[in-house]
Every structure is written in C-alpha cells, then in structure tokens.
Image (tube, rainbow, N blue to C red):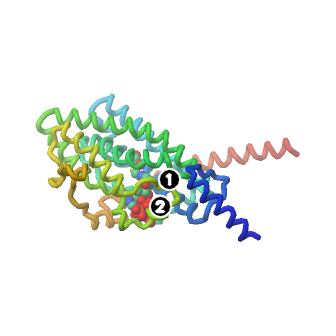
Amino acid sequence: MQKVDDAQAQIEFDRRIADEQKIEPSDWMPDDYRKNLIRQMSQHAHSEVIGMQPEGNWITRAPTLRRKAVLLSKVQDEGGHGLYLYSATESLGITRSDLIQALQTGMAKYASIFNYPTLTWADIGAIGWLVDGAAIVNQISLQRTSYGPYARAMVRICKEESFHQRQGYEIMYQLAHGSVEQKAMAQDAMNRNWWPSLMMFGPHDSDSAHSGRSMQWKIKRQSNDYLRQKFIDQTVPQIEVLGLDMPDPELKWNEEKGHYDSGEINWEEFYQVINGSGPCNYQRLKHHKKAHKEGEWVREAVRAYQEKQQAKQDKTAA
Ligand code: 3HC
C-alpha cells in the first residue's frame, strides 16, 4: 500500500516540477531531492556566514566613517542571508545544530572563495564587485528554483547582493581613478580575486557531480559553465570602465560565439581549496568554532525562555 502511495506521490511531484510549480515543506518529495536540497542550501548558508570573516577583517580599518558604516551593514546583511537560508533548510527536517556540526567537522562545504585572505582595503572593493557579482548571477537563476522557501529567500538576498556589488564597484572605481599606488592596489586585488571568483560557479559541467539531477529537479536552473560565462561577459566591460589591465591575458571577445574567450581555471587549486587545504580554511573554521562556542549562552537563554513559555501554556491548558 505504501509503495502505491509513494508511486502516486512521485507522479504528482514530477507533474508539479514539469508545470513549474513550487514544492513546499509539507509536500511529498523524493528522499534524494530532499537530501540534495539540504546539501546545496546548507552549503549556501555556510558560505554566507563564513563569508563574513574576510570582510569583517577590515571593519576596524575602513578608511572613512562612511566606508566603515557601509561595510558593517554589508557584513551584517551576509549574516542575515545565512539565517534565512538556515531557516529554509530547516524546513526540510534537519536541525540547525546538525547543519553547524556538518560545517565544523568538514562534512559540509562552503564557497571556496572565502578561503583566500583579504590583504588590502582594495580586496573589500574586489569582493563586493566580483564575489557578490558572481553570487548574484547564480542567485538570480536560483530565484526560479523549484523549492519554495529557497526561491523566496533568493528574492530578498538578490536585492541586497545587488547593493553589495555596487558598493564594491564604487570602491574599485575610486581606487582605479586615484593615485598610482591606489590604482596598483585595485589591480592587484582584482588579479587575485578574479580566478577564485570564477571558481565560485563550480567545476565544468562535464565534471559536476550533482548538476544532472539538480537540473532535472529544477533545483539548479542553469549550468555552472553557462553562469560562469554570463559573469565573464558582463564583467569584462566593467574592467574596461575601471581602466585596469585584464586579469587574464586570454580574455578576448569572440565574435563568432558572441562571448568572451578566457583562460583555463587552475582546477588543482580549486580542489585543494574545497577539500580543506586552501590558504585560510583552517583559520575560517577555527574562528567559526570559537564564535559558536562563545554564543552558547545565547542559545541556552533562548532554550530556557522557550521552556518557560511552554510550561506556562501547559499550565493554562491543564
Ligand atoms: N566552493 C566550494 N565547493 C564547491 C564549489 C565552490 N565554489 N563549487 C562546487 N563545489 C562543491 C559542491 O558543493 C560539490 O561538493 P559536495 O558533493 O561535497 O556537496 C562538489 O564541489 C561538486 O560540485 P557540483 O558542481 O556537482 O555541485 P553543485 O551542483 O552543488 O554546484 C554550486 C555548485 C554552483 C556552488 C551550487 O551548489 C550552487 O549554486 N549553490 C548555491 C549558491 C551558493 O552556494 N553560493 C555561495 C556563494 S557565496 C555567497 O552567496 C555569499 C555572498 O555573500 C557573496
């Protein structure tokens, strides 16, 4: 009987996916769909939260009060994105503490880009412009993902990322049009962040383990290579406006394809970073564990409050 019910539920699920209807938390869904969503959404949430560290590193050293206020607010936004995404992931039946444990034990990944250091103020410009820029290209596509809570979280996140991208570009524009030293700083930060930004889109489609199923289920709407190319095509004219040298000598407009050609990513470096051996992996997780431990009293207080409220409700009901 259960098998018949599941088979019918599967047919209904497939029909809804084909009809572009959203799947909601209380709907039946195949186990693998649920697991794949938990994997991608939690990695996305972890990326937002870990991503606060490289930029947070510059809050105390921002060059002006205005820059400090903007950066503080941006970093806070990223924390907020992590919270929406954790909540959306929890709607799939997993607890926040399980998700955090997976991050801290290295079972779950987070975006490779955040394992690189922010060496100068120009990195803050380059991250806002390139990293948030790459994130938006991916996340605009994810606004149409098939899981309702994920798609809805993306709408708000994209609006905020778009502001982040512009503030980053503004920093880069000012530096690129400043003194010789400032322009050199902007060039260096762009050169260092360019390749890791391209890596954010993941391996080539032919090497992507999850893309096939994820595209079939409409969790992912466009492929890793498609989105990476879109990012390159929109970013090269922005580099020209900055007046900086191209970070990749092979970046050339290809009239026939209607796209820019580019050099090959160093995939060995990519796999090293996603498997835990990037320049800052150890530092990022160490800091996360420390901050999480220091926040234990807050979680305890929330639990105590919830228990008290529950006891009150039980007493009233009795
Ligand atoms: N960094 C870390 N891990 C990566 C990665 C990257 N740039 N690209 C791929 N991977 C991992 C995958 O997670 C997967 O690992 P797993 O099997 O252990 O889960 C493995 O490499 C194989 O890659 P696949 O292509 O098969 O993986 P996906 O189909 O999941 O595609 C993805 C990768 C494009 C990153 C996809 O997961 C995705 O679109 N995720 C949602 C977006 C996201 O996570 N964005 C984070 C960006 S940072 C951000 O938004 C913060 C903002 O403030 C800038």
Marks counted in the figure total: 2
Q: In terms of depth relative to the viewer, which is nearer, 283 or 279?
A: 279
Picture coordinates of residue 171 (x, y %)?
26, 35
Q: Secondary structure at mark 2?
A: helix
Looking at the picture, does residue 4 appear above or below residue 111? below
Picture coordinates of residue 66 (x, y %)?
33, 28
Picture coordinates of residue 228 (x, y %)?
32, 53
Q: Secondary structure at mark 1?
A: helix
If the image is split into quadrants, where does the N terminus sit? bottom right
Dot 1 surroundings within 10 Å: few (below 14), some, or many (20 or more)? some
Q: In terms of depth relative to the viewer, which is nearer, 106 or 149?
A: 149
Q: In terms of depth relative to the viewer, which is nearer, 318 or 237?
A: 237
The residue at 30%/41% (across/down) is: 129
Residue 129 visible from this viewpoint: yes
Q: Amino acid at mark 1?
A: His
Circle nearer the N terminus (1, 2) = 2
Looking at the picture, does residue 207 appear above or below residue 132? below
Residues under numbered marks 1 and 2 in contact, where contact means CB atoms less than 8 Å apart:
yes
The residue at 50%/53% (across/down) is: 292
Residue 76's tag is: none
The residue at 18%/36% (across/down) is: 176
Picture coordinates of residue 51 (x, y %)?
39, 49
Q: In this view, which residue lies farthest toward the right?
A: 318
Residue 292's tag is: 1
Residue 104's tag is: 2
| For residue 125, side relative to residue 307 (left or right) | left
Dividing the image into four equal quarters, which quarter contains ligand 1?
Answer: bottom left
Q: In this view, which residue lies farthest toward the front?
A: 256
**Disc number lying in front (1 or 2):** 2
Residue 109 visible from this viewpoint: no
Q: Amino acid at mark 2?
A: Gln
Mark 1 vs mark 2, CA separation in Å = 10 Å
